[in-house]
Structure formats: structure tokens, C-alpha cells
Image: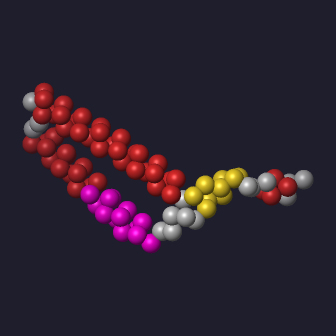
Amino acid sequence: MLTVPLSLFFYLYLAFLAVFVIFFLINLAHLIGTGTITIISAGITIAVVIFCAFILSFTWNFLQTVDWQTPVVLWDTTWISHLF
């Protein structure tokens, strides 16, 4: 049986968030650096920031009750043994 702790998925999520923040900051730097920040681009940027804040808030509240030591079964040989 192949199992991994649930915390592995949390670390993968944190890595995704780090990449997202890096690309978001690069996007902001390009908007400001090229002088293309307009009312529309600023509004969309603010909307994205608010949307991301809601997602992070809901995620934070949801993950408060998770037991991170729970094993997640990735592969179990009994799944195939029932076929034969």
C-alpha cells in the first residue's frame, strides 16, 4: 500500500500560491513599467485581488479543522486482487 500524508498536498498548494504571487507581481510590474495602467486594467486588477482574498479567506477557514497527519492511499494492491 502506497500512502502519503495529507500535508504533502498542502505543501503543493503553497507552492502553487508562491508561483501565483510571483506571476501576479510580474504582471503588476509590467502594467506599471509600460505605463498601460488604465481605469479598466486597474479595476480588473483590484477585482482579481479581492477575488483571491475571498478564496484565501475561505481556504484558511476550511483548513483550520483538517488533520494533516491523515494518510492518503495512492495505491492499494487489493484494488487489483478483486479483479482476478
| Residue 40 shown in magenta | no
**Placement of 26 over or under 73, stated as above or below:** above
Q: Residue at x 29, y 39 (%)?
A: 22
State how many labels appear.
0
Dominant secondary structure (helix, strand or loop) of the stretch shown in magenta: helix
Q: Residue furthest front?
A: 69
- Which portion, as a residue range, is magenta? 53-65
Q: Is residue 25 left or right of residue 75?
A: left
Q: Residue at x 85, y 55 (%)?
A: 81
Q: Quadrant of residue 38?
A: top left
Q: Is residue 19 left or right of residue 8?
A: left
| Coloring applied to the structure | secondary structure
Q: Residue at x 9, y 42 (%)?
A: 39
Q: Quadrant of residue 29?
A: top left
Q: Residue furthest right?
A: 84
The answer to whether residue 66 is visible is yes
Task: Return the x and y of residue 82 as percentages of the image width and height.
Answer: 85, 58
Q: Is residue 27 left or right of residue 19?
A: left
**Placement of 41 over or under 83, stated as above or below:** above
Residue in front for this viewpoint, 3 or 50: 3
Task: Return the x and y of residue 28 as percentages of the image width and height.
Answer: 19, 38
**Placement of 76 over or under 25, stated as above or below:** below
The answer to whether residue 36 is visible is no
Q: Quadrant of the N terminus?
A: bottom right
**Placement of 62 over or under 25, stated as above or below:** below
Task: Return the x and y of residue 17 as percentages of the image width and height.
Answer: 36, 48
Q: Residue furthest top?
A: 34
Q: Residue at x 65, y 55 (%)?
A: 3
